Amino acid sequence: MAHEINSATSEVSLNIYDAIGTSIVRGFRQSSTKLLFHLALYLSFIGGSIWLTWEFYVTDDARFLVVLACLAFLAVALGATIHRLLVLSGDVVILSPEGFHDLRLTAKLVPWNLIEYVSDWRLRGNSASTIILKLHGDAEDSLPLTLYGRLMRPYERLLGIQGIAVHTWTLDISHVRLLRLVHAYLAAAKKSDGA
């Protein structure tokens, strides 16, 4: 199973992915239930961090900066979650024969031929419900990112993420299913380019 997911360009995988219809446009929405859960989670983390800082008054500058960085990250995540609940409706992730588009991250569709490879980002060996799209050369730098996409870049780089990070935890499709579909569309695009 892991071989199937992680080797989309192998001949075995191309045969497996041929069964998935990649000539249609597929869109995926955000799950309101998952978004509300994340909203409550972020609020509790922010409240807990503020309480701990206030209660124990961190005096060490380095620890205080870490707390501030964590609070800034949580504030961005909270703001993005509120924005998604109030503003973004309809499909937010779109797969088409032409490319991949995550409306939460970029204003433009990313053509399949710009994507070098797709991977499942792992944290300590476990899937972190994040799909990484590694683009060729400096194509990533020329993408027009949304405000959320620009704000998340430094944190993603800090975590060692190289490429476009597509977070799947709030979507109405499972992480594994979306990862397989992305691999299938990429494999189909590479196959048609090679034909």
Image: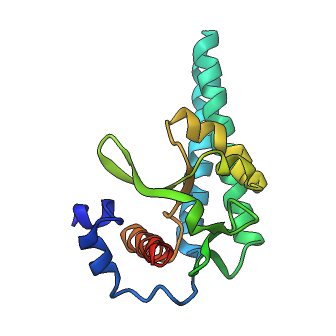
Q: How many marks?
A: 0
- Location of the N terminus by quadrant is bottom left
- Location of the C terminus by quadrant is bottom left
The location of residue 22, given as percent across then percent down, is 47, 85
Q: Is 53 positioned to the left or the right of 130 in the image?
A: right
Q: Is 193 positioned to the left or the right of 16 in the image?
A: right
What residue do we see at 62% from left, 68% from top?
A: 111
Q: Residue furthest top?
A: 60
Question: Residue 156: in sight, yes or no?
Answer: yes
What residue do we see at 61% from left, 27% from top?
A: 67
What residue do we see at 53% from left, 67% from top?
A: 170
Question: Closer to the camera, 60 or 7?
Answer: 7
Question: Closer to the camera, 94 or 9?
Answer: 9
The location of residue 51, given as percent across then percent down, is 61, 32
In the displayed structure, 138 sits above or below 131; it is above
The location of residue 100, given as percent across then percent down, is 59, 70
Q: Is 16 positioned to the left or the right of 121 in the image?
A: left
**Quadrant of residue 191 within the rendered picture:** bottom left
Say how the picture is coloured: rainbow
In the displayed structure, 136 sits above or below 47; it is below
**Quadrant of residue 29 within the rendered picture:** bottom right
The location of residue 181, given as percent across then percent down, is 43, 75
What residue do we see at 64% from left, 11% from top?
A: 61
Question: Residue 129: in sight, yes or no?
Answer: no
